[in-house]
Amino acid sequence: MSDFFEEYEGYPNYEKMAIHDEAHGKATRKKLWMVFWIMLIVTLFELFIGFKYSEVLGETNKEYLFIFLTVAKAFFIVFVFMHLGDEKKALKYVIIAPYTLFIFYLAFMAITEGVYSWHIKDVISAVAMHQ
Amino acid sequence: MSNQATAVPLKKDWEGGVSPFGVSYGKLFMWFFLVSDALTFSSLLCAYGFMRHKFTGQWAHPNEVFHHFPFLPGRDLPLAYVGFMTFDLIMSSVTMVLAVEAGHRKNRKQVMMWLFFTVIGGLIFVGSQCWEWYHFITGPELTATYHGVYRDYIMNGQHIINPHFTGANLVVNSYTMLPTFGDFFFCITGFHGFHVFSGVVINIIILLMVANGVMEKRGHYEMVEKAGLYWHFVDLVWVFVFTFFYLL
């Protein structure tokens, strides 16, 4: 397959572009371990909050904090571990933008309708009893 | 002629002849696959969010359901084992990214070592999930009472649900009145566990390819990077499942 692309004169060999030397590798590894420690501390913090301080924070604040920390962890995984941060702007937008838009919409719909279903559950059961 | 050849890479992104995204076709389509897979998992979690809000107040508290730890029977350690599983998956993600980094230096031995650790981490995770499923299905009191095994039975033409039943299946569970809780547990963690399993298989295949010197022949280790993308995605999904299913 790679021969097929090499037939085009001047087609860049993207597979080999990420190859780097020892010094560059050392800096990369340092960054990766740094991210690992951040993620480990965040996870331990989440567990700690989860069953020690849930009463202090309040249920809603705790939920928002968890969601924020989860999105922060997801950012580190996608942008550092999956190297999306090193890619071109076009690829970043193509991956992140449609997904984020769609999921905001879907989550909004699911939560709104779920809360609504909870509010009208007595109405539904009353109608069902009546029939 | 040689002057012309050096002039060619100056083409603009969308003029053709180059990849506008600056990646190879394999990596680009791995990303597209991962976006579609992420949409599948997101829809599962959004459906979970819908049910969770619909049955506010009736839903099971995960830290009361998942409070067992292997080799420590009877101890109340809420979510400790799930925390360990999360740590294990993040750790294996780190070893995977180190394998990718070693691949960028074309260091075959280091790639094999880190890939091997990644496979071990993945196997630990799958095994932990088996253990957790076993305890979720059999319930906490299986060893104490055998009569809890039968969920329901037919007597005199009537469908009777055993009040001593512990554990869970797709129809009923002893943690809550809602079968939906068990259904979502099996569906979401099962779908994720299957992804982890296939990721382990992919990693083993890549490890064998590296060991056979296939990547040396190609001159680059991009296949490790593509498998790494999939593996990080599995870790990414677990981060969300951990928060939305276990913590909230």
Image (spheres, helix red, strand yellow):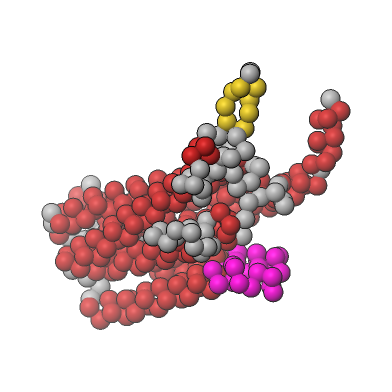
- The image shows residue B211 at horizontal and vertical percentages of 15, 57
**Can residue B217 be spotted in the picture?**
no
Magenta stretch: helix, strand or loop mostly = helix
Q: What residue appears at the point 85 percent right and 35 percent down from the top-left corner?
A: A126
Extreme-top residue of the structure: B157
Residue closest to the eye, A90 or A34: A34
Q: Is residue B17 left or right of residue A35?
A: left
Q: Is residue B66 above or below residue A22?
A: above
Write the residue at 55% across / 72% down: A48
Q: Is residue B235 left or right of residue B42?
A: left
**Residue shown at 59% from the left, 23% from the top:** B154
> Is residue B158 on the magenta stretch?
no
Residue A57 part of the magenta-drawn span: yes
Residue A43 placement (x, y as % from top left): 50, 69
Residue B241 location, x and y as percent? 52, 55
- Please name whichever residue, B190 or A71, is drawn nearer the observer in this view of the structure: B190
The residue sitting at 48% across, 39% down in the picture is B146
The location of residue B81, given as percent across then percent down, is 45, 61
Q: Which residues are magenta?
A: A47-69
For residue A11, side relative to residue A36 (left or right):
left
The foreground one among A125 and B218 is A125
Q: Is residue B205 visible?
A: yes
- Give the mark count: 0
Instruction: Using the image as rendered, state which of residue A90 and residue A77 is in the foreground.
Output: A77
Quadrant containing the C terminus of chain A is: top right
- Image height check: is B135 above or below A130? below
